[in-house]
Image (spheres, coloured by chain):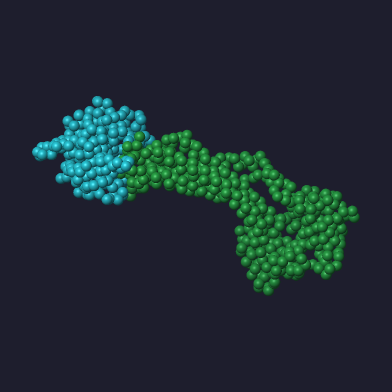
Chain colours: A green, B cyan
């Protein structure tokens, strides 16, 4: 048994040695082929790493600044006009659900938000606004990048955060007063005086122009009622999303509350669309790159067969089966793919941190006035994917030449000059 | 006992519109252990005859029987099996694999025959010892002379102890001294190992060494020395 295992191991080693020697027969051609595979691997790894960075950034941003991990709202809220006065939850319901959520050790913190729209301005200038108001401590954790001033605070119930673009438009700065008007659910007009506590910076100028962040108490003062549109639950372990969603769902059913539970993934559909679009673009590039690789490998393999025509004939004459010839050329393609992919991956490992350190930017995307940073996030899944795709491509590209090589007529091959 | 039998074998090629008859109604019996030389001018059909016996090509008409196994209409897999187990080849231009050492060249065809690494090593070393190349086994073909390369080719053909060895002009690419040395080696192997040996050649040295000669002309057997002994074959 030991002898048999040793024999198999020796045969395998001998086979690999034979294949590697064959690959290196025409070094220049092999290096060019492997370079094309390496470039293909590098392209795939860089594109996928870039999209992964973008995907992770968008998701983190969506959870942290917009949705939380889980949202709970009155039945029909998610399907209707989100900022209307309908589908609001009373403070009692909000407190009941919040208490239950905070009992769970997987929950980090809970916020509840009211959305309102109206007009805000000074005595000279005014503009429309969309107000997002929540518990100040929680809003501080969800806040966009602060450019000036301070985040929301419970100790400053009328201190609000406005966008840089709105501040410029209204000509106001930190500490200056503004008047906010809204129409209440009963149809009356209400107004309160607020102070600019902080000025934030956002990716989208449109967001900076209209969205203001205010403590929930000031919103309730304006609306003349204490109710909320949604409860946002933040988890300390995102992997427990489904489990916590189910617990909250069960709690709502048990208490006969007319509420709905949504995960951030259900709400942030746009992320899937954006990432899907980029993945589609990657796919197109990948197909082009791999077509080039396929043609390159096929050409190399055809040349190799052409050069070794008589050798194949002699091997066949001496008892090598067609399958052995096929296996030999497939293995050559496979190893070229392997070495090329490993080279491409090694280059990617060196190149990605280097490009990240340069802090390069792409021009601003649609609707944005901020440049998009070029950042790559390496992951073993991306490298493994690139390796497998390359191995498959190289193997696939070798099939036709290998079959062709195996079908050579022995006497033609031996006569070949 | 007949190791090889050819019954009314013809081979016709169709290189263009006009068919070319390479062999015409050839019948032949070769005994086990015989040293047969197929002689004839270039284009007489020597290589075609060897290719047919070597199961590298199929006759257009007729039957080929190797060790009582009829080879006609056999599947490629079965032909490969027969070539692997019954036949050894020595080529005019050696056909050694340049990326393999002398040892590995001899070992390569044995991989499917003997799986045990120790036994296989033993077989290779015995074959290399027989051709006096044991000291060269780690060299590559381009590091040894033409005569030595043909010796490697002989060791490769004999390593698996085949029933039949076919050699197509084995001395044509060698100088006189190397040619003689190779012939003596082949004759010794034939004598010691009782292997049926068929050579295609027009080398007079080879003709003088053979047990039996057949002379081909235009695809027909014009002379068979064994038949001559029998009395009436020479045409």
Residue A305: % across, % down? 40, 40
Nearest to the observer: residue A132 or residue B23? B23
Q: Residue at x 23, y 41 (%)?
A: B23
Residue A294 or residue A181, whichever sits in front: A294
Of A45 and B209, the residue lying toward us:
B209
Name the side, left or right, on which B99 lies relative to A353.
left
Residue B77 spot, x, y in % from top left: 31, 49
Spot occupied by residue B223 in the image (x, y as percentages of width and height): 16, 36
Quadrant hosting residue B103:
top left
Q: Is residue A75 above or below residue B149?
A: below
Looking at the image, which residue sits at the far left?
B231
Determine the residue positioned at 43% across, 38% down: A303
Labels in figure, total? 0
Query: Can the viewer see residue A366?
Result: yes
B172 lies above or below A197: above
In the image, residue A229 sits, relative to residue B197, either above or below, namely below
**Residue A379, how many percent across, how many down?**
58, 48
Seen in the image, is A86 located left or right of residue B121?
right
Residue lying at 66% horizontally and 57% vertically, measured from the top left = A270
Q: Quadrant of the C terminus of chain A?
A: top left
Question: Image point 22% across, 49% down: which residue?
Answer: B69
Q: Is residue B108 above or below residue A276?
A: above
Quadrant for residue B152, please give it. Answer: top left
Residue placed furthest toward the front: B17
Task: Please say whether residue B116 is visible from this viewpoint.
Answer: no
Left or right: A111, with A27 as reference point:
right
């Amino acid at each position: 048994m030991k002898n048999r295992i040793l024999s198999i191991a020796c045969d395998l080693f001998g086979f690999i040695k034979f294949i590697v020697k064959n690959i290196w027969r025409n070094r220049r051609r092999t290096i060019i082929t492997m370079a094309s595979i390496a470039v293909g691997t590098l392209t795939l790894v860089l594109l996928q790493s870039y999209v992964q960075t973008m995907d992770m950034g968008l998701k983190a941003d969506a959870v942290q600044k917009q949705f939380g991990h889980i949202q709970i709202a009155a039945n029909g809220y998610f399907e209707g006009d989100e900022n209307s006065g309908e589908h609001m939850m009373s403070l009692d319901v909000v407190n009941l659900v919040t208490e239950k959520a905070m009992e769970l050790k997987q929950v980090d913190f809970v916020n509840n938000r009211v959305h309102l729209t109206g007009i805000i301005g000074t005595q000279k200038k005014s503009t429309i606004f969309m107000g997002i108001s929540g518990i100040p401590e929680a809003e501080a954790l969800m806040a966009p990048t602060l450019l000036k001033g301070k985040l929301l605070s419970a100790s400053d119930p009328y201190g609000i955060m406005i966008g840089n673009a709105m501040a410029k438009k209204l000509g106001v700065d930190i500490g200056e007063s503004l008047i906010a008007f809204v129409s209440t659910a009963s149809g009356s007009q209400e107004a309160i005086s607020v102070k600019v506590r902080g000025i934030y910076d956002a990716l989208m100028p449109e967001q900076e122009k209209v969205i203001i962040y205010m403590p929930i108490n000031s919103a309730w003062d304006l609306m003349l009622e204490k109710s909320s549109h949604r409860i946002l639950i933040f988890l300390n372990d995102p992997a427990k999303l489904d489990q916590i969603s189910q617990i909250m769902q069960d709690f709502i059913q048990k208490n006969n509350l007319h509420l709905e539970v949504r995960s951030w993934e259900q709400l942030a559909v746009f992320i899937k669309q954006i990432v899907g679009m980029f993945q589609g673009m990657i796919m197109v590039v990948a197909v082009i790159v791999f077509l080039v690789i396929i043609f390159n490998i096929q050409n190399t393999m055809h040349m190799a067969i052409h050069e070794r025509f008589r050798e194949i004939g002699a091997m066949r004459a001496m008892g090598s089966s067609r399958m052995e010839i096929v296996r030999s050329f497939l293995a050559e393609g496979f190893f070229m793919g392997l070495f090329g992919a490993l080279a491409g991956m090694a280059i990617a490992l060196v190149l990605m941190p280097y490009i990240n350190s340069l802090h390069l930017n792409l021009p601003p995307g649609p609707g944005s006035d901020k440049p998009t940073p070029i950042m790559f996030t390496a992951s073993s899944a991306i490298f493994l994917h690139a390796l497998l795709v390359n191995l498959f491509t190289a193997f696939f590209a070798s099939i036709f030449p290998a079959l062709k090589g195996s079908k050579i007529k022995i006497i033609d091959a031996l006569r070949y000059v | 006992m007949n190791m090889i039998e050819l019954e009314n074998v013809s081979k016709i090629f169709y290189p263009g519109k006009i068919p070319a008859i390479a062999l015409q109604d050839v019948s032949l019996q070769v005994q086990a252990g015989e040293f047969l030389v197929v002689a004839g001018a270039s284009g007489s059909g020597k290589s075609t005859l060897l290719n047919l016996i070597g199961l590298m090509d199929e006759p257009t008409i007729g039957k080929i029987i190797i060790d009582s196994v009829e080879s006609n209409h056999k599947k490629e897999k079965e032909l490969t099996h027969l070539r692997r187990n019954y036949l050894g080849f020595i080529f005019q231009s050696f056909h050694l694999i340049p990326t393999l050492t002398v040892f590995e060249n001899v070992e390569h065809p044995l991989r499917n025959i003997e799986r045990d690494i120790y036994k296989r090593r033993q077989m290779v070393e015995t074959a290399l010892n027989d051709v006096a190349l044991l000291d060269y086994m780690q060299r590559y073909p381009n590091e040894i002379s033409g005569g030595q390369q043909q010796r490697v080719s002989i060791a490769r053909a004999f390593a698996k102890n085949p029933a039949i060895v076919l050699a197509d002009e084995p001395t044509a690419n060698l100088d006189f001294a190397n040619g003689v040395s190779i012939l003596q080696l082949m004759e010794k192997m034939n004598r010691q190992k009782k292997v049926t040996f068929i050579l295609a050649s027009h080398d007079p040295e080879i003709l003088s060494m053979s047990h039996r000669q057949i002379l081909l002309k235009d695809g027909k057997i014009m002379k068979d020395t064994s038949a001559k002994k029998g009395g009436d074959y020479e045409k």
